[in-house]
Amino acid sequence: MLNTQPAYLQLADLIQRKIETNEYGLGARIPSERELSEVFGLSRMTVRKAIDVLIEKGLLTRLQGKGTFVSKPRIDSPIDTIQSMRLFIQESGLIPSNKVLAAQKEKAGVKYGRIFKVSPDEDLFLIFRLRLGNGEPLALEYTYIPYNIVPDIETYNFEHCSLYDLYEKQGISFATDSQRLEIVKVCSPQSALLNIEEGSAVFMLHNTVTDITGRVVEYTRSYVSGDTFTFSSILT
Amino acid sequence: MSKYTNLLSEQIKEALESYIIEQGLEPGDALPSERALAEKLGANRLTVREALKRLRNEHQIYTRHGKGNFIAAPKIIEATHKLESFTSGWTADGYIPSGKVLLMEECEAPLSICRQLNLTLGEKVFSLKRVRCLNGEPIALEHAFIPAKLVPGIFHYNFERTSLYSILKTMYNLHPVKQEETISICHMNKSEARHLNAAEGEPAFLISSTAFDAKQAFEYCTTINPADRYILTSKLKSEES
């Protein structure tokens, strides 16, 4: 059957499909207007019109002198609900995954001893994870928990299992989550892992979680790229 | 041990944080020299320098050329879960708020403002741009937009001395019941930096908020807070507890 849609809309649909199937990845440069017009035998005008449609939809971004890029979606994470990062990523339509960079026992030391209200000699367990959405790095999380809070913590693979599920099995229920949001500049390795330039400004989010007995059961420090994240809250 | 967590300068940075706590160093106190720190922590000077840079990036310390490194003043902490005006919120926290009006005019609303306030392009809005200070230190650059039809005669008020929200409440019967905020990162341009006593290009919080009364969105405001002096906090309670 003959497609009766105007050529520019057909091309827009085609480019959109290529974005959806990840042929044009997030943040990637798509072929130039000249290349597209040659490949598909369309006038430059038609190609430009198709791209304009997708820019209007927010799928593409045109950067003066650099070309046209697939827009990275901004993830909007409510700061006023207790919710896991995994869910934020999922709810913004991206496929969440995570990479465990370290999972190890560490001494609390003075700094974390203070946060957990324990002696510096106490053991903590650190889970250092990179959160990804559609395979792109979004956030780095350093999660500290009391070492003995979950028996045999070393045996779990945090690429697949959620800390919150483990806590639920242990009968630990959260009571409060104190959050602090700062903006800092990052060095390596954080910048390299987040795939951003060294010295870029990122959000640094601290979450200190207590259970119903008042014990600190988690402290997480996350580095979140400002290009891909905004935080929001509704106050009443 | 993972190659990502045994980075020496990261470890030394954490050791420095512990050192600051143990020594009870206060804002304005000097840190020992790089060489002295290297000796104390058993690290080489380059690693200590790298670790100090990390602390500086997080605004925990500041450097004065030729004088060394000092503990930074604590950032001003703003709780996001309170719906109140700048003036009343900060007074309650023991700060002395003040402000300077940079711009007060009636203008035709650009598209971005129309979207937020449900106006048609070109409708008149009251626009008020202020620098807000706490204890004399600039902390926020605020630009508020209010549909002009809601606030006839608002030009008579002096917003250096009076809170915008209290005028809106008492004179125009606009009582905020809800506020939606989006927090993102921006880099201050020359004029923003000048008003906030900061360096051009430095990062800042950009907070866009829309305030609603029972009927409508009545104010859209963008606020810029320099990253080196500002923290946003919130404390959430689980619904079951």
Image (spheres, coloured by chain):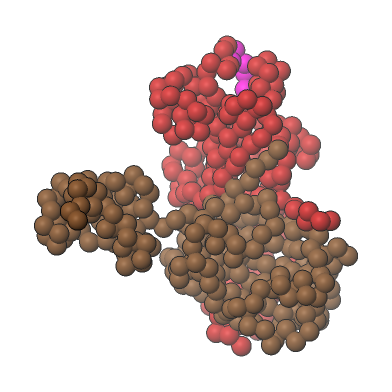
Chain colours: A brown, B red
Image quadrant containing the C terminus of chain B: bottom right
The quadrant in which residue B48 appears is: bottom right
Report the front residue among A40 and B116.
A40
- Residue occupying the point 64% across, 63% down: A84
Where is residue A49 drawn, in percent x and y? 22, 45
Where is residue B86 drawn, in percent x and y? 68, 34
Image quadrant containing the N terminus of chain B: bottom right
Q: Is residue B44 within the magenta segment?
A: no
Q: Is residue B227 above or below residue B192?
A: below
Magenta residue span: B154-159
Report the front residue among B141 and B79.
B79
- Residue occupying the point 51% across, 33% down: B116
Report the front residue among B36 and B219.
B219
Where is residue A196 drawn, in percent x and y? 44, 65
**For the view shown, which residue lies furthest in the front direction?**
A1
Image label count: 0
Where is residue B45 drawn, in percent x and y? 57, 78
Report the front residue among B57 and B30.
B57
Could you tell whether B230 is left or right of A50 in the image?
right
